Image: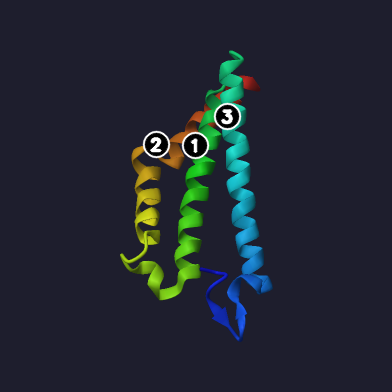
Amino acid sequence: YMMERKQFGSPIAEFQGMQHQYAQIATEIHAAEVMTYNVCRMKEAGLPFVKEASMVKMYSSQVAEKTASKTIEWLGGIGFTKDLLAEKFYRDCKVGSIYEGTSNLQLNTIAKILIREHS
């Protein structure tokens, strides 16, 4: 869509402000992927991984919600319609962060393990 939608004769994806936004989102998605693979590697190696799993679960849910929100923003008014799936993805991300363990629960887990590690 960003390559198709034009403003002032150019695709909106070519504007520096947009480039910074989608580059930031791409970076955050990549970081979440790398964190996920690292936790999988730790589990397979028999290493403790609960703290890191909580970190990646919290971070990934935040990235998913931010990405879905930005997508709606980039789509403009059509982003809120049911014609596209962006609004559904946003709702799913919001609900996912609630029923799969709130970020606060993940933070509690991380903090407890950090205290134990540094006591």
**Which quadrant of the rendered structure holds the C terminus?**
top right
Residue 52, numbered circle: 3
Q: Say which residue label 2 marks.
A: 101
Relative side of 11 to 81, left or right: right
Of callouts 3 and 1, the N-terminal one: 3
| Amino acid type of the residue tagged 2 in the rendering | Gly
Answer whether labels 1 and 2 touch (C-beta < 8 Å).
yes
Residue 64 coordinates in the image, percent (x, y): 48, 49
At label 3, which amino acid type do we have? Glu
Count of numbered marks: 3
* Residue 83 placement: quadrant: bottom left
Along the line of sight, the residue nearer the viewer: 10 or 98: 10
Label 3 Cα crowd, 10 Å radius (few <14 / some 14-19 / many 20+): some
Residue 112 vertical placement versus 64 (above, below): above
Q: Residue furthest top?
A: 46
Q: Residue at x 41, y 40 (%)?
A: 102
Amino acid bearing label 1? Lys
Mark 3 or mark 2: which comes first in sequence?
3
Choose between 113 and 17: the one closer to the eye: 17
x and y, in percent, of residue 26 in the image: 61, 53
Disc 3 and disc 1 in contact, CB within 8 angstroms: no
Nearest to the eye among marks 1 and 2: give it.
1
Q: Residues within 10 Å of mark 2 (few under 14, many from 20)?
A: some
| Residue 69's disc number | none
Q: Residue at x 50, y 40 (%)?
A: 58
Tell me, for residue 57, which label it has, or none. 1
Task: Report x, y in % for residue 57.
Answer: 49, 36
Asked where in the image residue 20 lies, by quadrant, the reply is bottom right
At mark 3, the secondary structure is helix
